[in-house]
């Protein structure tokens, strides 16, 4: 059973996180943005990191070997939203990375950039009233949070457009579908790459797009590449039921902020 953190508890860290404390120099902590560091909002452009979550994450940066934010958001958005030095930023599920201050796009997406742009233009004409989020040049997401009854329409349109343009159209959990290049990158493949050299790794996330990261880290343990893997589920009323099966479960971004603060307190106390 996962260990759940109560809203008032800021004492010792849950047992699964002891490995991060004991092996902090070789530990990697990966975290999602929307729903984990930032509350979910109707307009993605209006999302703001929870101040307590940002402060707690910043406390952990000098205490752990690697801190990375792995999100469906564009990498440039993450840098602007968090502005924490020495954090690795992986945007659009890992298709973008910030390297030496510049956003670097996976070169494998180049053949599909025109198709992504066409999909965004077509969606704006075909689906008036729905939010069309251009994720830089790499992907486009269609959101129906403010018009929940249009989910089937948006999904069907995205599937047809993806087939026509040679793109993929994966559902992204919270009332959105994304059109993106058919490049085999998700949060699972991204954390496998970022975890190289670590002996302990944890991922905190709240939605279906985060589950591959949970699975990938535990698979590394089974393969003998990692000694310890910890999944941290950020629970909400909209998250998939699998989030409740994580090694540690917290209540929303506020709960994650408290967990990170407790982790920083524990590491600092033992340093």
Image: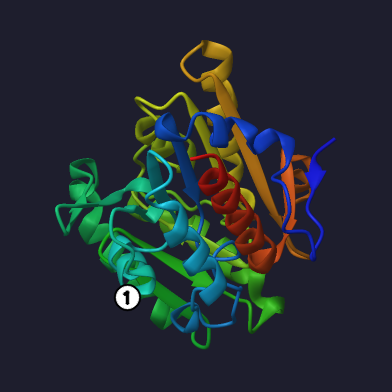
Residue 72 appears in the picture as rendered: no
Front residue of 169/8: it is: 8
State the residue at coordinates (63%, 84%).
146
Residue 98 appears in the picture as rendered: yes
Q: Residues within 10 Å of mark 1 (few under 14, many from 20)?
A: some
Q: Compared with residue 76, is residue 269 higher up or lower down, i.e. above or below?
A: above
State the residue at coordinates (80%, 42%).
3
State the residue at coordinates (48%, 40%).
271
Q: Compared with residue 226, is residue 45 higher up or lower down, i.e. above or below?
A: below
- The quadrant of the image that shows the N terminus is top right
Front residue of 254/70: it is: 254
Q: Is residue 142 left or right of residue 121?
A: right
Q: Is residue 99 left or right of residue 261?
A: left
Q: Compared with residue 101, is residue 168 higher up or lower down, i.e. above or below?
A: above
Q: How many marks?
A: 1
Q: Position of residue 158 (x, y in %)?
A: 49, 61
Front residue of 18/117: it is: 18
Pick out the residue farthest to the bottom.
129
Quadrant of the image occupied by residue 14: top right
Pick out the residue farthest to the top.
224
Q: Is residue 72 left or right of residue 109?
A: right
Q: Position of residue 228 (x, y in %)?
A: 57, 24
Kindly identify which residue carries mark 1: 121
Front residue of 47/14: it is: 14
Q: Secondary structure at mark 1?
A: helix
Quadrant of the image occupied by residue 154: bottom right
State the residue at coordinates (54%, 19%).
227
Q: Position of residue 20 (x, y in %)?
A: 55, 35
Q: Compared with residue 116, is residue 199 higher up or lower down, i.e. above or below?
A: above
Q: Position of residue 99 (x, y in %)?
A: 18, 50
Q: Is residue 61 left or right of residue 268?
A: left
């Amino acid at each position: 059973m996962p260990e759940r953190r109560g809203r008032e508890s800021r004492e010792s860290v849950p047992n699964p996180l002891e490995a991060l404390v004991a092996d902090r120099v070789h530990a990697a902590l990966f975290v999602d943005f929307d729903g984990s560091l930032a509350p979910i909002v109707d307009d993605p452009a209006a999302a703001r990191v929870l101040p307590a979550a940002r402060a707690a994450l910043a406390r952990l940066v000098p205490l752990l070997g690697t801190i990375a934010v792995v999100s469906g958001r564009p990498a440039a958005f993450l840098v602007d939203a968090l502005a924490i030095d020495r954090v690795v930023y992986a945007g659009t599920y890992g298709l973008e990375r910030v390297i030496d201050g510049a956003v670097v796009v996976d070169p494998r997406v180049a053949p599909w950039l025109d198709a992504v742009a066409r999909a965004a233009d077509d969606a704006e004409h075909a689906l008036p009233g729905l939010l069309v989020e251009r994720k830089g040049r790499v992907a486009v997401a269609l959101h129906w949070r403010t018009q929940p009854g249009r989910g089937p329409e948006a999904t069907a349109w995205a599937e047809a457009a993806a087939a026509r343009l040679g793109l993929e159209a994966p559902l992204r959990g919270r009332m959105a579908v994304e059109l993106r290049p058919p490049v085999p990158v998700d949060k699972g493949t991204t954390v496998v790459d970022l975890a190289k050299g670590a002996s302990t790794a944890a991922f905190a996330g709240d939605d279906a797009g985060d589950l591959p990261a949970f699975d990938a880290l535990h698979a590394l343990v089974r393969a003998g590449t990692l000694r310890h893997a910890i999944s941290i589920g950020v629970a909400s009323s909209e998250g998939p039921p699998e989030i409740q099966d994580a090694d540690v479960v917290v209540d929303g971004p506020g709960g994650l902020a408290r967990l990170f603060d407790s982790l920083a307190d524990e590491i600092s106390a033992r340093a």
